[in-house]
Image: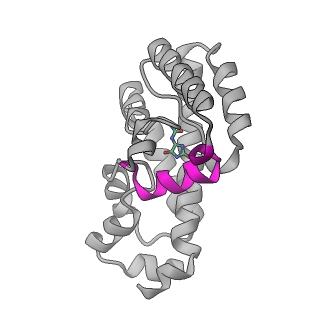
Amino acid sequence: MDINAVNALSYEDFLEIFGNVIEKCPIIPAAIWIHRPFTGLADIEAHISDFIDSLPESGKEGILRCHPDLAGRELQSGALTQDSQEEQRAAGFTDLQPAEVSRMRSLNSEYKERFGFPFVICARLNTRQDIMRELLQRLGNDRAAERARAIGEVKKICALRLRNLVLSDSANKL
Ligand SMILES: NC(=O)N[C@H]1NC(=O)NC1=O
């Protein structure tokens, strides 16, 4: 699907296809629809990024709270969105040993208790070893720095989801 095909989509189809580029936040692609015609993928990304940056800190934290835990119960029960399931698999979280699952869950809980939102990182750009290391390191940040860091990761996840949708062959059927 090229950018002309994206610009030709109805609002409903646009939302159907791009509704989860920010995990469980369809309001974000819905909000940037008004900026069509988009000049390219980078333009869509920039509008999403600007929209997120325009939110109050509580809104940014709300976005973070829409993300499932890495190696959490939803992964085990198959309740993740398809995007998230594939990303967690790519980082190796479907192959963890029970002791590693316990370790991740206890670090996730510690993080959530400290910051009030879940630990978010772009799983596709990291191995599970990188992610564990980052989690430990980021636990030492202050809340504002950590919120900004996590939102940066949300934008990376979004960029890869957008690329996957626009550049993948399976989307050509549109
Ligand atoms: N918590 C967290 O980082 N979740 C995610 N990361 C990612 O790449 N996909 C997710 O759902």
Q: Residue furthest left?
A: 12
Label the magenta part by its dominant secondary structure: helix
Question: At which x and y percent is residue 74?
Answer: 40, 41
Quadrant (top left/top right/bottom left/bottom right) for the C terminus: bottom left
Question: At which x and y percent is residue 155?
Answer: 55, 46
Q: Which residues are magenta?
A: 79-95
- Name the foreground residue: 146 vs 85: 85
In the figure, 167 relative to 82: above or below? below
Q: Residue furthest bottom?
A: 173
Q: Describe residue 121's horizontal placement relative to residue 55 as left or right.
A: right
Q: Residue at the spot x=59%, y=40% of the render? A: 153
Q: Is residue 85 visible?
A: yes
Q: Quadrant of residue 12?
A: bottom left
Whether residue 29 appears in magenta in the rendering, the answer is no
- Name the foreground residue: 140 vs 108: 108
- Name the foreground residue: 67 vs 12: 67
Q: Describe residue 64's horizontal placement relative to residue 45 as left or right.
A: left
